Image: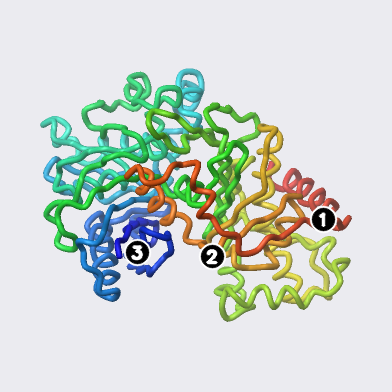
Amino acid sequence: MSFLLAIDQGTTGSTSLLIDAKNFQVIDKEKVDYPQIYPKPGWVEHNLEDIWNSVGSSIGVLLKRQNVDKSAILAIGITNQRETTCAYDKTGKPLHHAIVWQDRRTAAYCEENKTAYIKDCQKKTGLPLDPYFSGSKMRWLLDNVPAVKIAADRGELLLSTIDTFLLYRLTNKKKFSTEPSNASRTMLMDLETFNWDDDLINFFGLHKKMLPEIQDSFSQFGQTEACSFLPDGIPILSILGDQQAALFGQACVRVGDIKCTYGTGAFLVLNTGEKIVHSKTGLLTTAAYSHSGKKIYALEGAAYIAGAAVQWLRDNLKAIKNSGEVEKLALEVKDLSQMEHVLFMPFFTGIGTPYWNSEAKAAILGLTRGTENSHIAWACLEGIALSVNDSVSSFKKDFTQLNDIRVDGGAASNNLLMQIQANFSQKSILRPEVIDTTAYGVAMGAMVGRGEISIEDLGRYWKLEKEFKQESHNYYPKKKELWDSSIKKLYL
């Protein structure tokens, strides 16, 4: 047998997937977690050596368990947490912890420079000036870390997202590259050209020589060399940021295709094809992928809290013992009239699309003495679905062509949540057999990079596990109206 190896470098750990290269079946996977570092309130960091070691460990354990001859690995794909920012020198030595996408330390900088950015930069990037993205993190590293400044003065500084750091290490410092889905999240890439932009680089006080080369998402990124856990010579043929990798893994390659990944939060991506769509409703404009010089774009929406709301019921309210129990508890609600006024606003870390209120706080509204844990559980699932639906509603306003919604991630296994989602969004919800679509996406991308399949072929390998069709019930539009009016009263 021959295999594809997918490296999924996530926020809490690194997962490796082994996939049969002939029939594209997932053989096995292994995840290795690593510590989160919180130096100050609102600051989140990762030790880059912890990340590198977690990748090596996950690959090593996986290949040993499956007794795979390493020479049978045809190609590698890499997907990663996107905006997390790395500073290292040309020897590959980290100069500081990575600053994670969740980190808010540059909020004051972003607020001070917002007017100038909107005027001169935002149309090029498709992004607001926000600490979420990489550009202001890079600026902070230069301004506040002496080792970074010294390396810059010596011409030795490398700044990148996680994908490039892994590639640099995997290829023994031979390749310093990225691709558009990651580069578009830095605020330094021009969406029109898929190239670094001098004006954007100058805005953040950086230099192009610090940044990696941008190449097509499915192309020759180099080959392994001098890695203790892999033999030399395995080609790396695919790199995508995590949400775009999930889009690709869901075979969302037609204009109007949508995927929603339910993890800690929920992220939706809509394929807009070769057209750049600048949202009027608070969505992000981003690169989906590029191949053979063809540029594919997307709109993206975000709900900061999804599965984390269920975790809160488990850990804080002790209403359930494990996350899987929330569906059974919610199904104890037999009469939806009991739910008409109960709202769970899951804004523990602010509101994402379309309001972008980072100061918002969570709330449970409409309680009576008859409210039970089952009602709160149902309301929790509704709160997740309504948060996701706010992005769907924005998609409908910004783009005329919307296909059914393909779902993945841990919470996508909750049948009740998926049915509630279909009812609020008035779209069929399609759940595939493979829900590890992020890693699966870059494995498929590696086969595109090898020239063995075309992007148009992807739909042949996507298999439906279950479809949730929207139900007509006047409860759902009324609940949506209550949700909208409550957000306006409480948060806007």
Can you identify the residue that label 3 sits on? 18
Q: Which mark is residue 410?
A: 2
Can I make out residue 446 in this image? yes
Front residue of 429 and 97: 429
Q: Residue at x 72, y 73 (%)?
A: 330
Q: Which mark is residue 476?
A: 1
Q: Residue at x 41, y 34 (%)?
A: 290
Which amino acid type corresponds to the residue marked 1 in the rendered image?
A: Tyr
Horizontal relation, residue 5 to residue 248: left or right: left
Which amino acid type corresponds to the residue marked 2 in the rendered image?
A: Gly
Which amino acid type corresponds to the residue marked 3 in the rendered image?
A: Leu
Q: Earlier in the sequence, mark 3 or mark 2?
A: 3
Front residue of 391 and 121: 391
Q: Compared to 86, does 377 lie above or below?
A: below
Mark 2 crowd level (few <14, some 14–19, many ≥20, 10 Å Cα): some
Q: CA distance from mark 1 to mark 2?
A: 24 Å
Q: Compared to 32, does 46 lie above or below?
A: above
Mark 3 crowd level (few <14, some 14–19, many ≥20, 10 Å Cα): many
Closer to the eye: label 1 or 3:
3
Q: Compared to 50, does 338 lie above or below?
A: below
Q: Position of residue 383 (x, y in %)?
A: 69, 58
Q: CA distance from mark 1 to mark 3?
A: 42 Å
Element on which disc 1 rests: helix
Question: What is the quadrant of residue 25 in the picture?
Answer: bottom left
Q: Residue at x 33, y 59 (%)?
A: 37
Element on which disc 3 rests: strand
Q: Position of residue 140 (x, y in %)?
A: 31, 38
